[in-house]
């Protein structure tokens, strides 16, 4: 079963040992309430996801990969 964006972000935060509040402040300089609301909605632009990844010390990668190894 595919994970939704909220589950992906929360899993990544747990792996990075970072709270939503800390990430929200570091990535967007927003309050806990604002980032929690945004995460629960799961609607972020690609650029915002890259900012989130950067705040966690990670890289956001998004692509389609076919069995033959071709990526788009």
Image: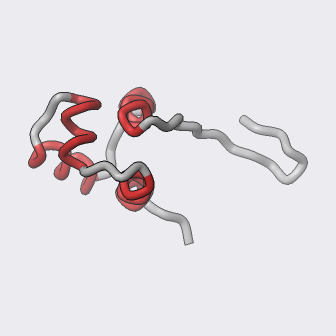
Residue 31, picture quadrant: top left
**Compared to 1, does 52 lie above or below?**
above
Quadrant occupied by the N terminus: bottom right
Relative to residue 51, is residue 2 drawn left or right? right
Q: Residue at x 72, y 35 (%)?
A: 72
Q: How many marks?
A: 0
Q: Position of residue 2 (x, y in %)?
A: 54, 65
**Compared to 49, does 7 lie above or below?**
below
Q: Position of residue 14 (x, y in %)?
A: 38, 58
Relative to residue 38, is residue 18 drawn left or right? right
Tell which of 48 and 21 is nearer to you: 21
Q: Position of residue 56 (x, y in %)?
A: 39, 39
Residue furthest front as drawn: 17
Q: Position of residue 29 (x, y in %)?
A: 17, 29
Q: Residue at x 13, y 43 (%)?
A: 34
Residue 8, picture quadrant: bottom left
Residue furthest right as drawn: 68
Q: Residue at x 27, y 40 (%)?
A: 23
Q: Residue at x 17, y 51 (%)?
A: 37
């Amino acid at each position: 079963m595919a994970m939704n964006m909220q589950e992906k972000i929360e899993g990544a935060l747990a792996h990075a040992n970072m709270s939503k509040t800390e990430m929200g402040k570091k990535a967007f300089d927003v309050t806990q309430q604002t980032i929690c609301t945004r995460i629960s909605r799961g609607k972020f632009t690609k650029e915002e996801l890259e900012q989130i990844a950067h705040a966690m010390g990670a890289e956001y990668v998004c692509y389609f990969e076919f069995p033959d190894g071709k990526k788009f």
